[in-house]
Image: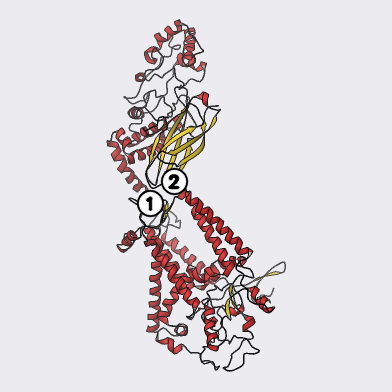
């Protein structure tokens, strides 16, 4: 291909670039003008952008840009706006009674949505994202409330926890009948059969075992085994159990006792968040 | 303007038909030297008179009238509802069109409307070519409107060409400034009218005057004003030729019987200047006056045949007919004609205009079917819409009495114009109990009664509990029946009830 001479394409009358593939030569058509203009504008834009925004790394610093604007600051500003908006609700909620909050149409929506978010952050690790719980961690969707399922009771539980470090924490302690040598193995075995019989009518127990139950368990669980809320002693006759999966686990609980710990959130979460959480948890299964 | 008269007869005719103007003009968009990379040559269409020009004036007033005035039509919908006849309420998620009110999930009505618009366009195109482009396309209408302004300030075609070539004088500066100012005002009003469709028009006008309107309103007015100004004032025919896909698409809708604006070369050729009292034998009717090119807003020569650039505005028909009347030849050298008619005339036949052809019949049938379906759907539009969402986490809850409970969120949309009470019943599980959160009103069979405000959506959490023995395995089919208490509206939704395996 000669360097100095233009090669004109016969058909179009346009000179070629000299590039050839399989006998097809590339025409040297000019760029469309709109394209050239757009390109020039883009180049100018590029320089202006570098000038206005933080762009170049320097040795110990970076070029901060003529606009002095960063996305980090924008995020901070936007977060401040959100915090301010939330604050209006939070301040009202901190002073209001929890039942009044639930009856306030706009606050109850805020509380429920905020409660759901706070639940995901703070409660879901133990209770599960859907609050269905695990063995040892109660399901908050069902209708058994060991420590009470009213709005106020739930709020108290969240505030002070269960077997926690707060002085107002909910506290109980089931004796470990075998470890503390309160009962013999055989007696524990009989008691287990009795407890099984509370939910399964096909399992019968002797009146001696019933007496054993009344002597040792009824103080907290009641003579009928339906539990006593003030002591946080669960109902042994219903279909829900926190720990029991089979006979062995009942033997285990009587022998060595069980009791989970829920932290107290008072001081770790603010008043409005705790009230939101209580309202949210109350809606999960309808509360009490 | 004063310049008009002076330039009216230039360049002078060399022929003896003193009455007709003869333009020395080349088609700006000549097929021969059409290049992809050539800079645009400005087109200066001359105004013409005639029936098509009158029709186009009417169409301009009619379509612009609808566009500018429609948002101002009021329509009483009662307390608390917008009283604008046509309103697209984005924030509220409603589209109001007189008696019709459409919710976002009913957007298929709009889809249907678009299909109807599309088919109608096919039908018109297959019948009489680019009627849409020529008479009702916004690009054509606004370009026409901008030309009116241009003519008012800068005069008729020849004066405008002269002004273009002249040096910058105070007079030229004034004319140009005045023209662009009026263009920008029209553009702003155009953009302004658009936002009125999305907001209450009188309120928005007030906000715009007091400068308190939302940023979005200014943004859209600015955007649309810019596009109107650029498309109508500057880009003009380039929009149709280079940007619009429609000229390319419509070729497939036309056949040899489709009407189109055409130069009847069989009558016009051989063309050439003609002296008065000269014989017309052995020559065509085209006297080379080039008036068809002078008036063409697309800058083409219609005598070169059907072209992509031609928007078929029919102004060349008017221009040619005027000349034909002056030289005493019959009208219709340029006319709506079909390709088939050229063949018919060649074979000695007469013109036949076949409007009813398989193609137009099929398009009409589709249009009829779609509009019937649409009308039926609209007439039988349900006033209630229900969605059921089953809780997925947890799937089910074990209750203390041994029952299994599932949670559902029910969303009831009341699309009627008054507050309604609905009862929610379930079928598919024996001995089931239903309870609704926050609802204290239940009927004798235990179904909750839910009140939904007029034109509102209400979301309610429902709990259904059932004994384990009444479940069919881990998934039981159930139906929710939502019935209006004092009415006939009913909605049935299928879902499942989950239980342990």
CA separation, marks 1 and 2?
A: 49 Å
Tell me what residue is drawn at x 49 percent, y 77 percent: B51
* Residue B16 image offset from top left, x and y in percent: 55, 94
The answer to whether B211 is drawn above or below residue B52 in the figure is above
Q: Count neighbours of disc 1 (C-alpha within 10 A) and say few if under 14, some if 14 to 19, many if 20 or more.
A: few
* Residue A258 image offset from top left, x and y in percent: 44, 19
**What secondary structure is found at the residue carrying circle 1?**
helix
For the residue pair B164 and B241, the one nearer the viewer reads as: B241
Residue at the outermost top position? A208
**What secondary structure is found at the residue carrying circle 2?**
loop
Residue at the outermost right position? A22
From this viewpoint, is residue B90 visible? yes
* Front position among marks 1 and 2: 2
Task: State left or right for residue B138 relative to residue B304.
Answer: left
Quadrant of the image occupied by residue A9: bottom right
Tell me what residue is drawn at x 63 percent, y 70 percent: B257
Quadrant of the image occupied by residue A112: top left
The N terminus of chain B - image quarter: bottom left
Q: Chain of mark 2?
A: B
For the residue pair A242 and A18, the one nearer the viewer reads as: A242
Disc number at residue B32?
Answer: none
List the residue tagged with mark 1: A73
From this viewpoint, is residue A67 visible? no
List the residue tagged with mark 2: B383
Residue at the outermost left position? A95
Same-subunit check for callouts 1 and 2: no
Q: Chain of mark 1?
A: A
* Residue B381 image offset from top left, x and y in percent: 47, 48
For the residue pair B454 and B307, the one nearer the viewer reads as: B454
The answer to whether A175 is drawn above or below residue B142 in the figure is above
* Residue B143 image offset from top left, x and y in percent: 47, 73
For the residue pair B141 and B446, the one nearer the viewer reads as: B446
């Amino acid at each position: 291909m000669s360097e100095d001479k233009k090669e004109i394409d016969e058909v179009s009358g346009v000179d070629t670039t000299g590039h050839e593939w399989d006998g097809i030569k590339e025409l040297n058509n000019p760029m469309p003008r709109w394209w050239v203009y757009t390109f020039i504008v883009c180049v100018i834009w590029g320089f202006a952008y570098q000038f206005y925004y933080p762009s170049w790394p320097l040795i110990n610093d970076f070029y901060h840009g003529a606009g002095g604007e960063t996305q980090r600051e924008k995020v901070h500003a936007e977060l401040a706006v959100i915090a301010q908006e939330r604050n209006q609700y939070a301040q009202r909620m901190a002073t209001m009674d929890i039942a009044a909050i639930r009856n306030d149409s706009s606050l109850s929506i805020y509380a429920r949505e905020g409660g759901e978010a706070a639940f995901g952050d703070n409660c879901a690790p133990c209770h599960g994202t859907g609050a269905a719980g695990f063995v040892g961690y109660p399901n908050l969707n069902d209708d058994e409330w060991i420590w009470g399922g009213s709005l106020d009771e739930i709020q108290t539980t969240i505030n002070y926890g269960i077997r926690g470090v707060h002085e107002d924490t909910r506290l109980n302690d089931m004796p470990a009948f075998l470890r503390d040598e309160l009962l013999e193995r055989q007696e524990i075995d009989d008691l287990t059969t009795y407890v099984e019989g509370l939910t399964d009518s096909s399992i019968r127990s002797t009146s001696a075992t019933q007496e054993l139950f009344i002597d040792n368990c009824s103080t907290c669980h009641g003579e009928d085994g339906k539990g006593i809320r003030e002591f946080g002693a669960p109902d042994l006759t219903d279909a829900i159990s926190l720990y029991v999966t089979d006979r062995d686990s009942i033997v285990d609980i009587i022998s060595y006792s069980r009791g989970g710990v829920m932290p107290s959130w008072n001081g770790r979460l603010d008043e409005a968040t705790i009230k939101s959480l209580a309202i949210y948890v109350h809606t999960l299964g309808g509360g009490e | 303007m004063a310049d008009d008269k002076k330039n009216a007869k230039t360049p002078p005719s060399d022929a003896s038909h003193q009455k007709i103007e003869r333009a020395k003009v080349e088609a700006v968009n000549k097929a021969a030297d059409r290049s992809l990379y050539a800079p645009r040559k400005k087109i200066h269409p001359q105004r013409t008179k005639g029936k098509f020009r009158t029709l186009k004036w009417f169409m301009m007033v009619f379509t612009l009238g609808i566009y500018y005035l429609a948002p101002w039509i009021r329509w009483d919908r009662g307390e608390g509802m917008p009283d604008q006849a046509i309103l697209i309420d984005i924030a509220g998620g409603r589209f109001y069109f007189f008696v019709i009110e459409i919710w976002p999930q009913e957007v298929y009505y709009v889809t249907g409307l678009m299909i109807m618009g599309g088919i109608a366009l096919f039908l018109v195109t297959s019948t009489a070519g680019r009627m849409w482009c020529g008479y009702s396309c916004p690009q054509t209408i606004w370009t026409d409107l901008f030309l009116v302004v241009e003519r008012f300030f800068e005069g008729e075609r020849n004066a405008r060409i002269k002004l273009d070539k002249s040096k910058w004088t105070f007079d030229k500066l004034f004319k140009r400034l005045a023209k662009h100012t009026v263009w920008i005002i029209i553009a702003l009003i155009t953009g302004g009218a658009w936002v009125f469709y999305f907001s209450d028009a009188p309120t928005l006008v007030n906000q715009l005057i007091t400068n308190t309107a939302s940023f979005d309103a200014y943004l859209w007015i600015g955007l649309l004003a810019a596009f109107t100004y650029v498309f109508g004032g500057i880009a003009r025919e380039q929009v149709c030729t280079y940007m619009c896909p429609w000229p390319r698409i419509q070729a497939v809708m036309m056949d040899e019987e489709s009407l189109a604006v055409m130069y009847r070369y069989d009558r016009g050729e051989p063309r050439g200047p003609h002296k008065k009292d000269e014989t017309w034998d052995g020559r065509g009717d085209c006297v080379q006056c080039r008036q068809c090119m002078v008036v063409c807003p697309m800058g083409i020569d219609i005598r070169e045949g059907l072209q992509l650039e031609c928007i078929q505005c029919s102004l060349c028909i008017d221009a040619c007919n005027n000349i034909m009347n002056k030289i005493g030849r019959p009208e219709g050298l340029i006319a709506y004609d079909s390709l088939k008619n050229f063949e018919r005339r060649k074979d000695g036949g007469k013109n036949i205009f076949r409007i009813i052809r398989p193609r137009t019949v099929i398009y009409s049938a589709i249009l009829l079917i779609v509009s019937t379906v649409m009308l039926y759907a609209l007439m039988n539009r349900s006033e209630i819409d229900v969605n059921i969402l089953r809780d997925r986490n947890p799937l089910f809850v074990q209750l203390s009495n041994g029952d299994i409970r599932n949670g559902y969120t029910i969303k009831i949309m009341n699309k009627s114009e008054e507050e309604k009470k609905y009862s929610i019943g379930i079928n598919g599980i024996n001995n089931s109990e239903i309870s609704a959160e926050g609802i204290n009103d239940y009927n004798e069979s235990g179904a909750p009664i839910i009140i939904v405000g007029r034109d509102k959506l209400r979301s309610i959490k429902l709990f259904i509990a059932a004994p384990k023995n009444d479940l069919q395995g881990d998934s039981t089919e159930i139906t929710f029946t939502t019935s209006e208490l004092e009415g006939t509206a009913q909605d049935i939704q299928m879902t499942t009830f989950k239980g342990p395996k």
